Amino acid sequence: MYEILKAQMLAENIYLMDVKAPRVAGSCLPGQFVIVKIDEKGERVPLTICDYDRTEGTVTIVFQIVGGSTARMSKLKAGDAFRDFVGPLGQPSELCKEPIDELKKKKILFVAGGVGTAPVYPQVKWLKENGVDADVIVGAKTQSLLILEDEMKAVAGNLYITTDDGSYVRKGMVTEVIKDLVKEQGHKYDVCIAIGPMIMMKFVCLLTKELDLPTVVSLNPIMVDGTGMCGACRVTVDGEVKFACVDGPEFDGHKVDFDQAMKRQQLYKTEEGRAYLKETEGDTHKGNCGNA
């Protein structure tokens, strides 16, 4: 069992929890995720690691209520526990693999949309701890849904906040902030990392391709087992089949087929849709094991 040490509501339907998981905390890196289960009959829920403390042996997760399992999770309190807490899964951020001296030469821009702020935060924090500043754009539908603002301010070189309805700081989409920074203010970036809703990442990539700005996205399609066996998180990148849970979650955003990914995500939610995908995708329908 994995004890919950802290349970906090960050915004409407968005929750943060610190979980005692020493083995995960001891080996995870920014960009990776875990899969949690409340009990033996519970659904497997994939969640990006928002933060970790190797000394305390804790991992921080942030989740939004999107169905029955996450609704049940939201009712858990400090002292309760998860039945399973599996990780770290997926590949760490590519930034973690680069020499620090090289990273210090780069101008990095992060773009976070909604709950995507949670997986952006550990990457920016890791960079800050290694002496690398990064600019961060955070977008939310409205001020009440903005999360981790103070935490992000503490680690970002510059933090730019925008809300769809203009209820806080400025009005507009994150793409408008990118345009303002690059086209109007003359900022030059070497790489952009965008994490958030699939539709947001699509339009960020359309813009950054126009700006000739290399862009990495962290994909969040439906996942079931987190080991590449079920095929739920199948995506197409540069014409090749990839599985977000083992090959990602990070990919070159300019090579991702977002339209296919979004359509597939909707189809996978129904039994009829899954049957259609199995029929049309053939041998590539499943992941690494081929016949899971």
Image: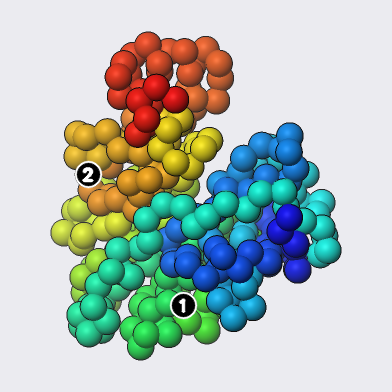
Dot 1 or dot 2: first in sequence order is 1
Residue 172, position as x, y percentages in the image: 46, 58
The numbered dot on residue 125 is 1
Vertical order, 239 against 202 (above or below): above
Q: Who is closer to the viewer here, 131 or 230? A: 230
Q: Who is closer to the viewer here, 156 or 24? A: 24
Inspect this view and state whether residue 277 appears: yes
Report the quarter where the N terminus lies: bottom right
Report the quarter where the C terminus lies: top left
Which residue is at a point 73% across and 34% down the rendered structure image? 41
Question: Mark 1: which secondary structure?
Answer: helix
Q: What amino acid is labelled 2 in the image?
A: Lys
Q: Residue furthest left?
A: 212
- Distance from disc 1 to disc 2, alpha carbons, whole Å, reads 27 Å
Instruction: Write down the residue under mark 2.
Output: 255
- Left or right placement of residue 30 versus residue 57 in this view: left
Residue 6, position as x, y percentages in the image: 75, 68
Question: Mark 2: which secondary structure?
Answer: helix
Which residue is at a point 43% across and 13% down the rendered structure image? 276
Vertical order, 284 against 189 (above or below): above
Residue 38, position as x, y percentages in the image: 73, 46
Total tally of numbered discs in the picture: 2
Vertical order, 167 against 186 (above or below): above
Q: What amino acid is labelled 1 in the image?
A: Lys
Q: Residues within 10 Å of mark 2 (few under 14, many from 20)?
A: some
Q: Nearer the viewer, mark 1 or mark 2?
A: 1
